[in-house]
Amino acid sequence: MQTLTINIQNETLAKKVLWMLDHFKNDGLEIISKEDIEDLKLLKATRDDESVSFEQYLTDETKR
């Protein structure tokens, strides 16, 4: 697998590039945003962490 990163500053051009790339999905192209990759890395890092109940999560969040 090869990974390609494209930085596009112009929103209109970004939409056009994504539109074009969408046409290659049936050929096996996978489009992942940089934000999604960062989220997946963070999620992977927590795989071995101890689980926290939802109630405990809410309690911790209200303390912040």
Image (tube, rainbow, N blue to C red):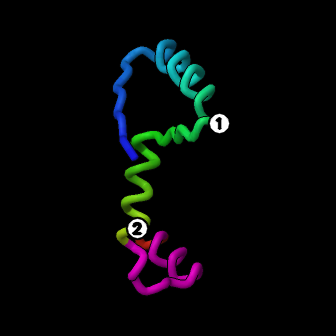
Q: Position of residue 38 (x, y in %)?
A: 38, 51
Q: In the rendered view, does 15 fall on the left or right side of 63?
A: right
For the C terminus, the quadrant is bottom left
Rendered image quadrant of residue 45: bottom left
Above or below residue 22? Residue 28 is below
Viewer-nearest residue: 40 or 29: 29
- Report the number of numbered marks: 2
In percent of width and height, residue 60 lies at: 45, 76
Q: Residue shown at 38%/62% (left/top)? A: 42
| Amino acid bearing label 2 | Lys
In the image, residue 19 sits, relative to residue 38, either above or below, namely: above
Residue density around tag 1, few if under 14, some if 14–19, many if 20 or more, within 10 Å: few
At horizontal 42% and vertical 73% (from top left) the residue drawn is 63
User: Which amino acid is tagged 1?
Assistant: Asn
Q: Against 58, is 5 above or below?
A: above
Answer whether residue 49 is magenta in the image. Answer: yes
**Residue at position x 37%, y 18% from top?**
9
Residue 36 part of the magenta-drawn span:
no
The residue that label 2 is drawn on is 44
At 51% from the left and 76% from the top, the residue drawn is 57
Q: Quadrant of residue 25?
A: top right
Question: Looking at the image, which is closer to me, 56 or 1?
Answer: 1
Q: Which residue corresponds to mark 1?
A: 26
Q: Secondary structure at mark 1?
A: helix
The span picked out in magenta is 46-61
Closer mark to the observer between disc 1 and disc 2: 1
User: Tag 2's secondary structure?
Assistant: helix
Judging depth in this view, the residue of 10 and 19 nearest the camera is: 19
